[in-house]
């Protein structure tokens, strides 16, 4: 096996593992479906038998009533077992879907089937729309396996803003640790059936932070004393002949206490059910994370941040769930008298508010930690599925970017054409010329997307990539705006102004300008483009400027060393225009516009 064969061999191993796990879960689902049918028939038999026994026992009275208990208990047991089997089958089916989605990504069938992240799209962001970070077929869709909104928010934030180098290195170590954790990623993917539609981080944070003004601490201690007094006086009346007076006085004291605190208790009980389903889902997610032992520094820190006073959050949430269930039991008409006697509503409300005072401030921390681990697992899944893609090296010092074998990570590996790009002091920027469809825009996007991935902590589509910390600004997909009354040209020059302003920031800027100022005449385009590029270079920015206007290539001649001309070429094959997408030094010497027009049937 040659070195070139190694990545494809490893990739086939990934595909084989996904297929093996999918088939295993498919077999489990089929077995559970068959067992479910058997249990369904058994339930029906038990129900019919119990109904017949009831008729014989209580209708015609030919058998003892005890005979009814056996099929009735069997029916209840079968209902419980059947429900468990159905849940296990649904879980196996979701696991099948999880691995089928992975196979779709490996086979380049993934576009439009995952979480697109369209809600994060912002036309005013300096590069998100230009680099296809969000939307169907986007970088976010390719990466994201996070089920919770918190995990998706965190991943989107990493793509939209470059992180400091030390943070990136910590993420790389975490991703490397999580890369092979298929079981963990499977379990996180199976949390809840529609967890992403229900887990609302902001709502949970608001509930945890809101709080109701609690009663004095003595009130919480007094409630169980009053309830205990009522119970003792009741038994004293029934068993020892104390008479009704002590019990009546105890009830009066309880009623007065409940009336005194009703204004604070009622809002607590009315409000606690709203976040509980989200908290149940969060607890399921956190319980899985609590059971995992990490070694990389970032993951260890995130795991440690989950505990509150040494108690895992899943146990904290389980305590709250018990309180909520106890409060809900008051709705049962048989339990209602006991609930009133024990001041269950008041005591639960006081305990819930005590829980919120202790754990409410930690809810945001739990969500952030779980979201970050989910985001890291998303990148780790991508790293596992793309074993040929290395982690980049972030370097200190002057602005630089050295890419060898650079390609676009959204293209199928079989279609990726790789190029080398080197930007530093000389050259600081490249003028990329070439005919239409020759690969200029793809090169700009490849460089930009890989710079985004590199500074998010992800692997990159390159043989090797070194870069210093860089901001990113792009003008590739700028459109007019009917709502804002802005033409395409006005939108472009507005974006260019933003890019020039961004070059004044602390980080050197990587600028990516596609067909710069092509919406105006050639004279104004050359003067304007030269001014913009010179201004960016003077601010220490690195970048690429693409054009098919050869007059703009003269800018590089005037800035020898700092600017360099490179180009793509095309050629005719059997009357059709063909491209090799290989970057070459110098200026392109021909155009294919007429050939393309003729190729689509225009008489030119």
Image: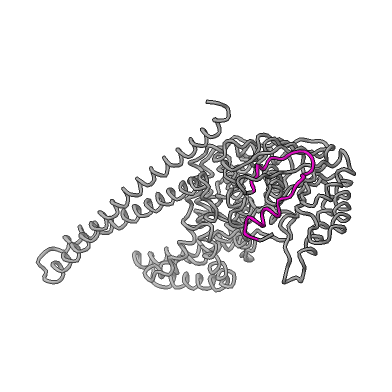
The residue depicted at 22 percent of the width and 63 percent of the height is 47
| Direction top: furthest residue | 1
Question: Image quadrant for the C terminus?
Answer: bottom right
* Between 95 and 51, the one nearer to me in the picture: 95
Q: How is the image coloured?
A: one colour
Instruction: Specify whether 294 is left or right of 21.
Output: right
* Between 323 and 408, the one nearer to me in the picture: 408
One can see residue 308 in this view = no
76 vs 334: above or below: above
* Between 383 and 494, the one nearer to me in the picture: 494
Residue 79 drawn at (x, y percent): 30, 58
* Between 33 and 265, the one nearer to me in the picture: 33
The residue depicted at 9 percent of the width and 66 percent of the height is 62
| Direction left: furthest residue | 62
What residue range appears in magenta? Answer: 577-602
> Residue 598 magenta-drawn?
yes
Residue 459 drawn at (x, y percent): 63, 40
Residue 594 drawn at (x, y percent): 70, 55
516 vs 463: above or below: below
Instruction: Specify whether 115 is left or right of 123.
Output: left
Residue 534 drawn at (x, y percent): 88, 48
Based on the displayed image, in which of its 4 quarters is residue 129 positioned? bottom right
One can see residue 258 in this view = yes
Instruction: Specify whether 541 is left or right of 226.
Output: right
């Amino acid at each position: 096996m040659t070195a070139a064969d190694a990545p494809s061999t490893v990739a086939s191993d990934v595909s084989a593992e996904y297929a093996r796990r999918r088939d295993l879960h498919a077999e489990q689902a089929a077995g559970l479906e068959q067992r479910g049918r058997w249990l369904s028939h058994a339930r029906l038999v038990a129900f019919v038998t119990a109904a017949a026994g009831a008729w014989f026992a209580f209708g015609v009275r030919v058998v003892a009533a005890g005979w009814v208990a056996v099929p009735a208990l069997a029916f209840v047991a079968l209902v419980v077992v059947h429900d468990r089997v159905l849940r296990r089958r649904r879980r196996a089916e979701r696991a099948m879907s999880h691995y089928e989605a992975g196979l779709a990504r490996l086979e380049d069938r993934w576009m439009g089937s995952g979480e697109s992240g369209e809600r994060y799209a912002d036309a005013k962001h300096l590069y998100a729309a230009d680099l296809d970070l969000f939307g169907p077929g986007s970088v976010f869709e390719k990466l994201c396996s996070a089920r919770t909104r918190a995990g998706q928010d965190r991943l989107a934030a990493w793509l939209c803003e470059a992180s400091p180098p030390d943070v990136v290195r910590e993420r790389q170590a975490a991703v490397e640790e999580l890369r092979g954790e298929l079981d963990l990623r499977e379990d996180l993917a199976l949390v809840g059936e529609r967890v992403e539609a229900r887990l609302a981080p902001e709502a949970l944070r608001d509930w945890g932070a809101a709080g109701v003004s609690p009663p004095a601490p003595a009130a919480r201690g007094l409630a169980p004393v009053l309830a205990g007094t009522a119970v003792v006086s009741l038994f004293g009346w029934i068993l020892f002949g104390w008479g009704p007076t002590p019990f009546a006085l105890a009830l009066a004291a309880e009623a007065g206490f409940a009336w005194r605190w009703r204004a604070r208790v009622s809002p607590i009980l009315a409000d606690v059910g709203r976040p509980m389903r989200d908290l149940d889902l969060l607890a399921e997610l956190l319980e899985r994370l609590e059971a995992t032992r990490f070694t990389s520094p970032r993951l260890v820190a995130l795991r440690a941040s989950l505990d509150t006073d040494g108690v895992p959050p899943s146990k904290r949430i389980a305590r709250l769930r018990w309180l909520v269930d106890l409060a809900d039991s008051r709705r049962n008409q048989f339990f209602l008298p006991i609930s009133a006697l024990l001041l269950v509503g008041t005591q639960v409300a006081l305990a819930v508010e005590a829980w919120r005072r202790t754990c409410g401030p930690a809810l945001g921390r739990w969500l952030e930690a779980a979201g970050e681990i989910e985001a890291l697992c998303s990148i780790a899944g991508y790293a596992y599925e793309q074993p040929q893609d290395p982690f980049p090296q972030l370097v200190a010092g002057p602005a630089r970017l050295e890419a060898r074998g650079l390609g676009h990570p959204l293209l199928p590996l079989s279609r990726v054409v790789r190029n080398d790009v080197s930007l530093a002091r000389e050259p600081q920027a490249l003028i990329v010329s070439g005919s239409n469809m020759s690969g200029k825009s793809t090169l700009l996007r490849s460089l930009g997307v890989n710079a985004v991935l590199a500074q998010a902590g992800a692997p990159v589509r390159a043989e090797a990539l070194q870069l210093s910390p860089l901001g990113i600004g792009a003008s590739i997909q700028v459109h007019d705006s009917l709502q804002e009354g802005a033409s395409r040209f006005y939108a472009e020059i507005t974006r260019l102004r933003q890019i020039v302003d961004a070059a004044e920031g602390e980080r050197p800027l990587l600028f990516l300008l596609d067909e710069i100022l092509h919406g105006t005449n050639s004279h104004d385009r050359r003067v304007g483009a030269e001014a913009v590029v010179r201004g960016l270079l003077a601010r220490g920015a690195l970048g690429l400027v693409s054009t098919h206007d050869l007059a703009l290539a003269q800018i590089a001649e005037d800035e020898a060393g700092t600017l360099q001309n490179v180009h793509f070429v095309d050629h005719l094959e059997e009357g059709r225009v063909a491209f090799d997408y290989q970057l070459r030094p110098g200026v392109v010497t021909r155009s294919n516009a007429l050939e393309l027009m003729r190729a689509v049937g225009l008489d030119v």
